[in-house]
Amino acid sequence: MSATAIPLGHALPHAVDAGDHSPASEKLDGLYVEKVNTTWDDTPIVSPELEARITRKFDRHVVPWLFGLWLLAFIDRSNIGNARIDGLSDDLKLTGTQFN
């Protein structure tokens, strides 16, 4: 039995009984393969109050940590430039692009 490639973005078909020949099925390697729906129609309903609570909780708990990480990364990038000006490349005997 040979493998058949399924394009990305398509749902995987499933085999059905050989007696079922609906228009939505096609024959593949001796099996009838039914095409399945690839859309998601069953979206969850979230109340506006719950969504507001989750957003506030995210803003209070996650955003401060993200800001702190961003600030530390900014300070680190700034300090490496200051260290080069202060003579780090001379102390470590770096030449050309070795500092990068």
Image (cartoon, grey):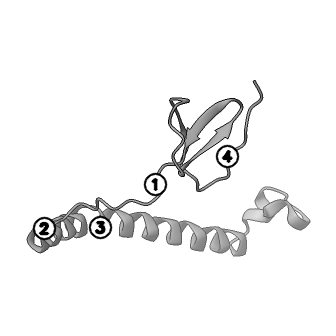
Q: Residue at x 54, y 51 (%)?
A: 23
- The CA span between labels 3 and 1 is 42 Å
The dot on residue 64 is 3
Residue 86 placement: quadrant: bottom right
- First in sequence: mark 3 vs mark 4: 4
- Number of the front mark, 4 or 1: 1
- First in sequence: mark 2 vs mark 1: 1
Q: Is disc 2 in contact with disc 4, using a CB cutoff of under 8 Å? A: no
Q: Is disc 3 in contact with disc 1, using a CB cutoff of under 8 Å? A: no
Helix, strand or loop at label 3? It is helix
Q: Camera-side residue: 75 or 92? A: 75
Circle 1 sits on which residue?
A: 37
Question: Furthest-top residue in view?
Answer: 1
Where is residue 66 drawn, in percent x and y? 38, 65
| Residue type beneath disc 2 | Arg
- The CA span between labels 3 and 2 is 17 Å
- Relative placement, left or right, of 61 versus 8 is left
- Number of the front mark, 3 or 2: 2
Crowding around mark 2 (Cα neighbors within 10 Å: few <14, some 14 to 19, many 20+) is few
- First in sequence: mark 3 vs mark 1: 1
- The CA span between labels 2 and 1 is 34 Å
The dot on residue 53 is 2
Helix, strand or loop at label 4? It is loop
Question: Furthest-right residue in view?
Answer: 96
| Residue type beneath disc 1 | Asn
- The CA span between labels 3 and 4 is 44 Å
Q: Is disc 4 in contact with disc 1, using a CB cutoff of under 8 Å? A: no
Circle 4 sits on which residue?
A: 6
Crowding around mark 1 (Cα neighbors within 10 Å: few <14, some 14 to 19, many 20+) is few
- The CA span between labels 2 and 4 is 41 Å
| Residue type beneath disc 3 | Pro
Q: Quadrant of the C terminus?
A: bottom right
